[in-house]
Image (cartoon, helix red, strand yellow):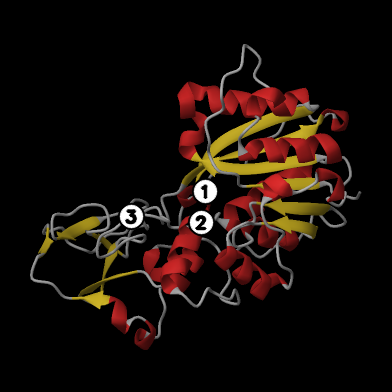
Amino acid sequence: MITITEKTLTGMTFIDLFAGLGGFRLALESLGATCVYSNEWDKPVQNVYRENFGDLPEGDITKVDEHTIPDHDILCAGFPCQAFSISGKQRGFEDSRGTLFFDVARIIRQKHPKIVFMENVKNFASHDNGHTLEVVKGTLEELGYTFFKDVLNAVDYGIPQNRERIYMVCFQNDLKIKDFSFPKAFPLKKHVEDFLLEDESLVENLYISRPDTYFNGIADTSYSNKPIRLGIVNKGGQGERIYSIKGIAITLSAYGGGIFAKTGGYLIHGRTRKLHPRECARIMGFPDSYKLCPSSSQAYKQFGNSVVIDVLQLIGIEIGKVLPDSKS
């Protein structure tokens, strides 16, 4: 997380939909905003959220009555990428029926927050030949919003991880915000080695030694803002590749197999291991005070599904800059 000095969203309220581990919440709270409602259906994730924030998110969003949701200034949602059924030429609200985005849209229609702030996988932009994004944009415009989007990579914002995501920021037309700029990229100063745990006893069980480990001969001496592959285990499939800690991390994933599943393998002190859940948390921008799921397999999956807090904070700062008045 970035240390915020000017809390540009002070006095604003927000809701946290598809809340996951609460990445949006940590980002917006750091900017002075207050969370008034959260929703997350995954039970283990709900429990981690409650451990960290003190409240249990409501469950299945499809069963939530939008009238019961508190008024709020900002709606946050990292909703799943799903195809929309094509019902006709329109690219709007009715086209979104049958998807989880429809539930986001009906809450927006009822509550009409000032700002809608959404995140999705990079492929969302090209999903279903661009139709999915068209429907989302069309729906927001139909509901009275000005729509802005960009694909940003965490590595361009201080986090050593190759993680491209599409971010969408929409303002109520009444705010008359005609121009919005996403944060400018800046050079990377830290690499994977800066995010590792210092206490080797915590990670000793993660090291592996196998006869089918092969290194490619690349000298592990230079820093890079890309992943540096040094070798493989077995056949070198996804989850079987070894990288340098002087480069950046590959995209943390919620899925995938292999000995280094979900994080990739790294050469550390001459030995190879996957990342520890706490290291994954750090590479997603979560502070060390954040309490992790006791199950490592769940924790890996949860961070693979999460959002990079630093990027959300930087976008939040830009949102604060264009608002005529950050108070409700």
99 is higher (above) or lower (below) than 134: below
In the foreground, 271 or 91: 91
201 is higher (above) or lower (below) than 166: below
Residue drawn 23% across the image and 55% down it? 229
Q: CA distance from mark 1 to mark 2?
A: 7 Å
* Residue beneath disc 2: 158
Q: Which mark is residue 266?
A: none
Look at the numbered discs 1 and 2 and tell me whether their residues touch, using CB distance below 8 Å: yes
Classify residue 191 as left or right of residue 99. left
Whole-percent x, y for residue 53 in the image: 71, 70
Do we see residue 183 in this rendering? no
Q: CA distance from mark 3 to mark 1?
A: 31 Å
Classify residue 163 as left or right of residue 272. right
66 is higher (above) or lower (below) than 267: above
Whole-percent x, y for residue 110 in the image: 84, 37
Q: CA distance from mark 3 to mark 2?
A: 26 Å
* Type of the residue with mark 1: Phe
Whole-percent x, y for residue 316 in the image: 70, 49
Q: Which mark is residue 256?
A: 3
Classify residue 268 as left or right of residue 26. left
- Of the numbered discs 3 and 1, the one sitting upstream in the chain is 1
Look at the numbered discs 3 and 2 and tell me whether their residues touch, using CB distance below 8 Å: no
* Residue beneath disc 1: 186
Between circles 3 and 2, the one closer to the viewer is 3
- Of the numbered discs 3 and 2, the one sitting upstream in the chain is 2
Residue that protrudes farthest toward the top in the picture: 89
Whole-percent x, y for residue 321 in the image: 77, 44
Provide the secondary structure element on which disc 3 rests.
loop
Would you identify the image quadrant in which residue 231 lies?
bottom left
- Of the numbered discs 1 and 2, the one sitting upstream in the chain is 2
